[in-house]
């Protein structure tokens, strides 16, 4: 391979070896029980998408350099050099197709986390200059935007004026506000680009009388999808530093699966520090406000049959199964479960940055068929899912397969059920 | 003992035990000396209490019920294989010495009946999952996923079982003779007693032990480390 230092790549692998990874690389019996756990393999029947095979690609490099017998007899394990062209090509497809849903881990008898292994694969690909270029552009754009925050701050504050009016109109509360840069607030809320995740959250926080402030930075983290930990951390750092500067007690992440995973489960390990604030997902926050009577919901106010899609990063990978269902069952007159659901739920097919990558569009629509069939079987006219990625994918599936679904965020679903003057 | 038997069923046994112990220690020390990522990789829902986590690790390692849900055939064969293997291994201790409590319970005749029925039945039953393990590797997607190690291990197993079953069904020597052989190994003077040395099936025993030795030597460097690692990896699931 031209221009790529093999030793540098080997160093990337070496620094990424940890105990969990060793278990995963040493134990797999190649039993293929994971094959029917992966929606991508189930649909395509292509071995490249078989979780054990995806992991096997990294294992082949590992055996070549690290296993006592693999070093002497690499053929015995199909051992490969780290700069093997064919291997890196396969690795690219396998790693950047993975949605990170970790459903294969659920079914594996050894609980092998394929996504964890593919995280290493992405680091190697990035070091070899073979990272996904679209995700890299998005990552760099996001980092640039953060660097010029002075410029974007004014645009944002301008935009927030009309957003604030919208919130005031809906709540009938002239004092409802969207504070930014409020030092000493209890909550820092990290939203997404645009206002669609700001308006409903602002209504909820104002109605619950919470002392909150809006983050200047969007929660989304393309660096994580790209699989470049250094850049992913750089993106996450901005919210962390803002939270520290404002001395908030809690950072609430909007309905964005991977952003929550980064902040809740990955950041402390990346930064090797304990965060001085609590990280909460908005789903958990809303559930608490409902329990504490801070926000009121009109029971049975949503009449059409409606179902709930467990985003992998909210359900299986974070443990919020009952909280959203509790809210759904209060508001919906006809709540219907998909099968399978909860920790066994099928991935929508859009996670892992696939939704942001036009190259993957055909693939993710094709592999979203299981989700489509699941939704159809419920006969629901609407679907709630508290993850932006899932909703974008569901929206694409909705249009492509003519499902005629109304797709809602949990926040919007909640706000529409609140007894507000703005709700008819 | 003839030269081949002396090497395969004598000296090599000691080599195998030594390599096995060193190799296992090497791998386990290797794992424990590698820093653990502080990322909690657990899946939800997970047990809240320590005891709950402990029992979940045992359940996930011994029964892995979630695998049954997604691949029933593989799960059934895995349970049959590992269950039979465990009982067969335990039963081999009868070739070292008698299980006194069990003899008190069943009597000598009872022991022989149990051994005849149990040993023979499991010796046959275990063939099926092993054949399943071999044959599926010739079919996609397993074929595309498999490496030489997979075929090697399953072929070694088949040879061990085939020679073992031959000894069980056709050999004209019995438990007392095996005990004499095992005792000779234990005092580092490996030899076959007259009943084995003079039998046509002598070579079968030597081959059975030879392939067990090969498996035992290779064990610590293979995916078979899952016998220990499964507990550690399944614990990560509950982290």
Image (cartoon, coloured by chain):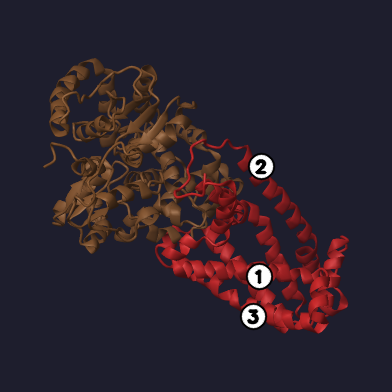
Question: Which chain does the numbered disc 1 sit on?
Answer: B
- The single residue placed furthest to the left in the displayed view is A424
In the picture of the structure, the residue carrying the numbered disc 1 is B160
Q: Image quarter for residue B197?
A: bottom right
Above or below, B42 against A53 in this view is above
How crowded is the residue under tag 2: few (<14 C-alpha within 10 Å), some, or many (20+)?
few
Q: As rendered, which of A166 and B179 lies closer to the eye? A: A166
Query: Which chain does the residue under circle 2 lie in?
Result: B
Element type where label 2 sits in the image: helix
**Helix, strand or loop at disc 3?**
helix
Left or right relative to A83: residue A188: left
Q: Residue at x 49, y 47 (%)?
A: A59
- The answer to whether tags 3 and 1 share a subunit is yes
Task: Give the colour in which the image draws chain B.
Answer: red
Q: How far from the left and from the top, in percent, is residue A372?
A: 23, 58
Looking at marks 1 and 2 on the same chain, the residue that comes earlier in the sequence is marked by 2
Disc 1 and disc 2: Cα gap in Å? 30 Å
Residue at the image position 30 percent from the left and 29 percent from the top: A190
Circles 3 and 1, Cβ within 8 Å, touching? The answer is no
Quadrant placement of the C terminus of chain A: top left
Q: Does A51 sit above or below residue A71?
A: below
**Badge 2 is on which residue?**
B29
Q: Residues within 10 Å of mark 3 (few under 14, many from 20)?
A: few
Marked residue nearer the N-terminal end (3 or 2): 2
């Amino acid at each position: 391979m031209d221009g790529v230092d093999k030793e540098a790549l080997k160093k990337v692998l070496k620094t990424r070896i940890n105990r969990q990874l060793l278990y995963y690389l040493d134990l797999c019996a190649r039993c293929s029980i994971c094959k029917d756990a992966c929606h991508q393999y189930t649909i395509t029947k292509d071995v490249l998408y078989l979780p054990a095979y995806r992991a096997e690609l990294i294992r082949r490099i590992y055996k070549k350099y690290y296993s006592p017998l693999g070093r002497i007899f690499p053929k015995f394990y199909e051992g490969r050099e780290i700069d093997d062209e064919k291997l890196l090509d396969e690795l690219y497809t396998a790693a950047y197709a993975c949605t990170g849903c970790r459903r294969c881990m659920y079914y594996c008898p050894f609980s092998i986390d394929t996504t964890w292994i593919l995280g290493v694969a992405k680091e190697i690909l990035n070091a070899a200059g073979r990272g996904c270029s679209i995700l890299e552009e998005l990552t760099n754009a996001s980092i640039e935007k953060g660097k010029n925050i002075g410029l974007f701050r004014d645009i944002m504050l301008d935009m927030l004026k009309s957003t604030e009016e919208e919130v005031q109109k809906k709540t009938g509360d002239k004092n409802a506000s969207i504070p930014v840069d409020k030092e000493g607030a209890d909550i820092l809320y990290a939203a997404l680009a645009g206002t669609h995740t700001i308006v409903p959250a602002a209504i909820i926080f104002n109605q619950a009388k919470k002392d909150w402030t809006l983050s200047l930075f969007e929660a989304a983290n393309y660096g994580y999808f790209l699989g470049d930990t250094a850049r992913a951390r750089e993106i996450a750092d901005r919210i962390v530093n803002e939270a520290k500067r404002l001395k908030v007690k809690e950072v609430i992440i909007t309905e964005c699966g991977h952003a929550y995973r980064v902040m809740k489960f990955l950041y402390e390990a990346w930064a090797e520090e304990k965060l001085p604030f609590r990280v909460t997902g908005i789903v958990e926050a809303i559930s608490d406000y409902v329990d504490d009577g801070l926000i009121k919901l009109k029971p049975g106010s949503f009449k059409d049959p409606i179902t709930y899609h467990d985003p992998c990063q909210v359900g299986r990978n974070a443990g919020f199964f009952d909280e959203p269902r509790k809210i759904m069952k209060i508001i919906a007159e006809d709540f219907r479960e998909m099968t399978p659901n909860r920790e066994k739920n099928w991935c929508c097919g859009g996670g892992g940055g696939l939704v942001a990558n036009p190259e993957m569009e055909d693939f993710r629509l094709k592999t979203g068929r299981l989700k489509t069939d699941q939704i159809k079987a419920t006969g629901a006219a609407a679907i709630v899912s508290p993850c932006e990625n899932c909703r974008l994918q569901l929206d694409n599936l909705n249009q492509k397969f003519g499902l005629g679904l109304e797709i809602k965020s949990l926040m919007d679903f909640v706000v529409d059920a609140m007894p507000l003057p703005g709700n008819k | 003992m003839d030269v081949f038997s002396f090497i395969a069923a004598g000296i090599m046994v000691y080599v195998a035990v030594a390599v096995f112990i060193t190799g296992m220690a090497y791998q386990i020390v290797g794992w424990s000396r590698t820093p653990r990522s502080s990322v909690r990789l657990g899946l939800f829902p997970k047990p809240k209490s320590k005891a709950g986590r402990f029992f979940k690790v045992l359940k996930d390692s011994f029964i892995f019920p979630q695998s049954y849900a997604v691949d029933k055939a593989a799960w059934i064969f895995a349970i049959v294989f590992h269950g039979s293997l465990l009982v067969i291994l335990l039963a081999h201790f009868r070739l070292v010495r008698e299980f006194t409590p069990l003899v008190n319970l069943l009597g000598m005749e009872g022991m022989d009946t149990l051994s005849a029925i149990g040993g023979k039945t499991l010796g046959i039953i275990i063939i099926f999952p092993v054949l399943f393990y071999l044959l599926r590797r010739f079919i996609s997607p397993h074929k595309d996923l498999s490496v030489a190690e997979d075929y090697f291990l399953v072929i070694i197993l088949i040879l061990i079982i085939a020679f073992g079953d031959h000894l069980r069904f056709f050999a004209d020597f019995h438990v007392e003779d095996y005990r004499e052989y095992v005792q000779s190994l234990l005092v580092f003077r490996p030899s076959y007693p007259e009943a084995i040395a003079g039998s046509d099936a002598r070579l079968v025993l030597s081959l059975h032990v030879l392939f067990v030795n090969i498996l035992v030597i290779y064990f610590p460097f293979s995916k078979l480390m899952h016998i220990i690692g499964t507990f550690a990896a399944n614990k990560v699931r509950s982290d």
